[in-house]
Amino acid sequence: MKQILLIIDAQQALLDGNQQVSPIYKKEQLIKNANKVIKKSKQSDAAVVFVRDLDVAEGKGNGFHIHSDIHVPTEARFFDKAATNCFYGTGLLEHLKSQDIEHIVIMGCETQHCIDSAVRTATINGFDVTLVGDGHSTLGNDILSAEQMIAHHNATLHGHYNVEHFSIVRDSEEALFCPTHDSYRLS
């Protein structure tokens, strides 16, 4: 089975915050888990793809780049997006289909926006998805804290399906590149 690790919006300025916006919730854990999952992807011969948001740091400079503490593989692919959905206008879907990808492991920022839309869009486009439950984060909002939002999405997206394809939520400690979707489908 061909699979990839898709890391969304793990950019320096988004993770670190600035004078107007606080750092992403549990930034250090997110970075640590990203590096752990990148290492697992290499051991599983799964490619790594990063998606960067062009709104972050106005799409330029160090703030736009992947966070300096994340170990970006030299062979990683990059797609830049202008919309919340990383599949919209980026060529990502065409790339995944051309590579015969069947399973996508997803992590990054922000939970209620780009992560949610990526998981749902991937399943309707024929991919099984594993969302890294301790590998996505957000800032929260006036209604839900970041912790509540992450917990809500982990509960909502675990078992989310679009007929044939599912999303499963698993933590970074688990064997993410040994998908469990078939056993879940049969239960």
Image: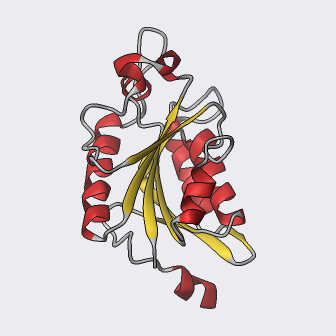
User: Can you name the residue that lies furthest to the bottom here?
Assistant: 186
Q: Between residues 99 and 70, which one lies in front from this camera angle?
A: 99
**Image quadrant of residue 166?**
bottom right
User: Can you name the residue that lies furthest to the right here?
Assistant: 163
Q: Measured along the vertical axis of the image, is residue 162 above or below residue 182?
A: above
Q: Measured along the vertical axis of the image, is residue 128 above or below residue 79?
A: below
Q: Measured along the vertical axis of the image, is residue 58 above or below residue 4?
A: above
Q: Between residues 53 and 138, which one lies in front from this camera angle?
A: 53
| For residue 43, side relative to residue 100 (left or right) | left
Q: Position of residue 94 (x, y in %)?
A: 62, 56
| For residue 119, side relative to residue 176 (left or right) | right
**Image quadrant of residue 85?**
top right
Q: Between residues 133 and 55, which one lies in front from this camera angle?
A: 55
Colour scheme of the picture: secondary structure
Q: Is residue 3 visible?
A: yes
- Can you say which quadrant of the picture contains the C terminus? bottom right
Q: How many marks?
A: 0
Residue at horizontal 42 percent and vertical 34 percent from the top: 25
Q: Is residue 187 visible?
A: no
Q: Position of residue 69 (x, y in %)?
A: 24, 35
Q: Position of residue 159 (x, y in %)?
A: 62, 71
Residue at horizontal 75 percent and vertical 76 percent from the top: 163
Residue at horizontal 39 percent and vertical 77 percent from the top: 178
Residue at horizontal 36 percent and vertical 24 percent from the top: 16
User: Can you name the residue that lies furthest to the top here?
Assistant: 19
